[in-house]
Amino acid sequence: MKKSLLIASLVLGFVSMIGSSVKAQDAKSLWTTLAKVTFKKQYDEMLGFKVDVPIFSPEIKSLEGKSVEIKGYIIPVEGYRGQKEFVFSAFPYNMCFFCGGAGPETVMEVISKEPIKYTTEAITIKGKLDLNANDINRLMYGLKDAELIKSAK
């Protein structure tokens, strides 16, 4: 991942397929499900101090590797052009986790099949959910093979 993502994840410290994906009506509420995470303090040998390690609820674990739809906002990593790797947030840029307005459960790393054009409006994307509890250089949620489902109006 890009240097800014690595830095961001250091600050972080830390769906069984129903049809083919979580339905579009659930795209907004998926963030509510992803918020059902707790944390435990664990000593990190490399860093030399304790970090928060996510403990995913059974509901979250059941979504791992499944195709899900989620609605949110692009937080650009490299400028504002279309990009294939970016951070996706439940909240707009000025309220996102990196600005101190939300928790780490409100953001995810996205790797899309095709570049997705930056917009300040909410969009809906679809991809395979990836959970990360071990690599402190990454966010705890990821979406692989993402595709744009619904762009901003």
Image: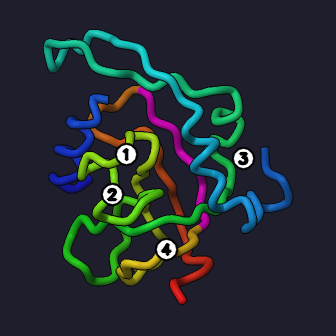
**Mark 2 residue crowding within 10 angstroms, few (<14) / some (14–19) / many (20+):** few
Give above or below for 34 relative to 61. below
Q: Amino acid at mark 1?
A: Ala
Q: Residue 122 got which mark?
A: 4
Closer to the chain start, of discs 2 and 4, is: 2
Q: Amino acid at mark 4?
A: Ala
Closer to the chain start, of discs 3 and 4, is: 3
Closer to the chain start, of discs 3 and 1, is: 3
Left or right: 54 with respect to 128? left
Q: Amino acid at mark 2?
A: Met
Give above or below for 39 relative to 148. above
Start and end of the magenta stretch? 126-133
Residue annotated with mark 3? 15
| Membership of 132 in magenta stretch | yes
Left or right: 8 with respect to 145? left
User: Residue shown at 39%/83% (left/top)?
Assistant: 117
User: Of helix, strand and loop, which mostly describes the magenta segment?
Assistant: strand
Residue annotated with mark 2? 95
Closer to the chain start, of discs 2 and 1, is: 2
Q: Where in the figure is residue 24, as x and y percent of width and height? A: 72, 68
Q: Amino acid at mark 3?
A: Val
The Cα atoms of the two marked residues, 4 and 1, are separated by: 17 Å
Task: Give the camera-side residue of 66 and 80.
Answer: 80
Task: Give the camera-side residue of 128 and 41.
Answer: 41
The Cα atoms of the two marked residues, 2 and 4, are separated by: 13 Å
Residue annotated with mark 1? 102
**Label 3 element class:** loop
Contact check, label 2 and label 1, Cβ < 8 Å: yes
The quadrant the C terminus occupies is bottom right
Q: Where in the figure is residue 112, as x and y percent of width and height? A: 46, 68
Give above or below for 118 relative to 50. below
